[in-house]
Amino acid sequence: GIALFRGECLDWREIDFYSSCTEWRVIFIGRDVGGAVQYLCGQGRGHTLYQPHYRTIWPWMKSGGDVTSTSEIVLPSFDDLLQRTDVLNAPEVYSCLSAQAVRAADRLGKFVTITVWETLPKHITRWLPPYAANIRYVTQRVNLFLPVTERAAAYLQSLGVRGDRIEVLSPGVRLDRFVPADNAHDGCRVLFVGRLVPEKGVRDLLVAFAQAVRTNSHLELWICGRGPLQCE
């Protein structure tokens, strides 16, 4: 089995994968804000959802965002919960969830992996506590890092992680769902897919598109996603 530490919400790509997975029994650890994990765990395939309590460990940083607010999960019978698993997985080397997963793996002798999306070598978490301490601890103890892009792999290498501990695991595409359309279109179509949050550069994209469309009226901008900027 595998235990997934996921904080606020499981990634939808992972939900899509595990909904058809019969080889692994999965324990999802974290808040489920969308109801998808409850649905998945009710399919009779042995998956389990554990929604723990959280406590803020740096309350003076509670100003919003992934970097400025941090909490750790509170797990009663923590070791008992994880004894049924073979692999522990958590997101990002700087997160408190990852540090807890690594500590649990050390206690229980489990294989631990970290999925990495971060790509910025000079990200503020390299110097900001408690994230800097998490990075030092996690990068030393994890068995295998799973960056989703080559740039994320380069970020890990900038932290001193050896190449033999890195395996790029690019997100896949369901070809039975996403196929080329038969209908052609004139002009140039720009597609943005992602969360509608400031850090994804959505506002920058809108400004750039407004400038480009002045000289090319055949441009189209398609935005696929949801988030706080959806109402703008």
Image (tube, helix red, strand yellow):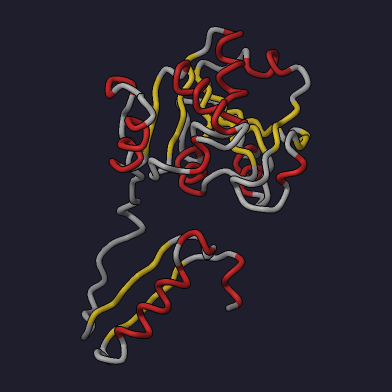
Which quadrant of the figure contains the C terminus?
bottom right
Task: Specify whether 182 is left or right of 42.
Answer: left
Q: From what the image shows, is residue 30 above or below residue 108?
A: below
Count of marks overlaid on the render: 0
Residue 224's quadrant in the figure? Answer: bottom left
Q: Which quarter of the figure has residue 228?
A: bottom right
In the image shown, does 142 or 63 lie closer to the viewer? Answer: 63
The residue at the point 56 percent across, 10 percent down is: 106
The one nearer the camera, 163 or 8, is 163
Q: Position of residue 50 (x, y in %)?
A: 70, 32
| Residue at point 33%, 46% (across, down) | 172
Give the residue at x 35% y 51%. 174
Residue pictured at 77% horizontal, 41% vertical: 59
Q: Quadrant of residue 131?
A: top right
Q: Single out the residue that lies furthest toward the front.
A: 127
- Is 77 drawn above or below residue 97 in the view shown? above
Asked if residue 35 is positioned above or below residue 20 in the image, the reply reads below
Q: In the figure, is residue 203 to the left or right of 191?
A: right
Report the side of 46 relative to 144 (left or right): right
* Pick the front one: 155 or 185: 155
Residue 24 spot, x, y in % from top left: 49, 25
> Picture coordinates of residue 160 (x, y %)?
35, 25
